[in-house]
Image: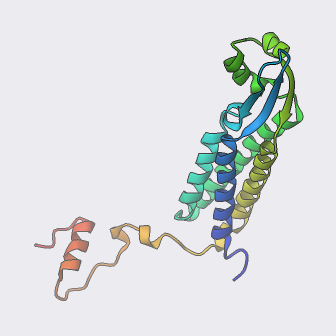
Amino acid sequence: MSLARRGRSITLLGFVTSGAIGIISSTQTWFTVERTDAGAEILVPGASALVLLAPLSLAVLALGAALSIAGRALRVVFAVLAAAAALFLGWSTLQLLVTDPLAAVGPTVTEATGLAGDTAVDAVVASITPSMWPGLALAGWVVLLAAAVFALSTWRRWKAGGRRYRTADDAPAHGDGPVDAIDSWDDLSRGTDPTR
């Protein structure tokens, strides 16, 4: 079986992997803040450093679940939404890694120290050390973007899926022969009265 024929499985694996990495990393320490006042260090979790990390990671997982039963038109929509989420989260995570993450740790520092305002927070922060989790999350967003691009390039060759989720209107009607209990239930599902 060719790679393109396994497109749905490969895409689903990419979505689930990146979404899981995002959810797990949202609960882990992204930055450790050393204080100038010799107070205890402040641990900043991913959900505090990047506020949309957990909700968008959950959305990616939901897109993966929906993609497993999606029809042809929705495949493209879900892939585009996943690519947009990957670009946004990737850019936001990269910004935290390459620029001064003082704005990202500010709310957590304010909560821990009671000091508000950029000047006060800057005065209490001696250093900010990133952990491995922002880099791991960034790798997850690269995987998500690759899975979305792969889905957009192969969705036409995917096997038809979701037969079990089709409505009763898609099912063929029974013939003119004798009607059993199963046929009666099927007729009721289609909205017709089998007693007539």
In-image side of 44 versus 68 (left or right): right
Q: Which percent across, then down, holds residue 23?
A: 64, 46
Query: Is residue 74 among the parts visible in the rendering?
Result: no
In-image side of 23 versus 86 (left or right): left
Q: Residue at x 33, y 78 (%)?
A: 172
The image quadrant of residue 68 is bottom right
Q: Residue at x 18, y 79 (%)?
A: 181
Which of 52 and 170 lies nearest the eye of the viewer? Answer: 52
Q: How many marks?
A: 0
Q: Quadrant of the C terminus?
A: bottom left
Q: Residue at x 59, y 53 (%)?
A: 61
Q: Quadrant of the N terminus?
A: bottom right
**Relative to 156, does residue 41 appear above or below in the rendering?**
above
In-image side of 43 versus 184 (left or right): right
Q: Which percent across, then down, holds residue 126?
A: 87, 21
In-image side of 111 versus 187 (left or right): right
Which of 38 and 127 lies nearest the eye of the viewer? Answer: 38
The image quadrant of residue 171 is bottom left
The image quadrant of residue 37 is top right
Q: Which percent across, then down, holds residue 137?
A: 75, 47
Q: How is the image coloured?
A: rainbow
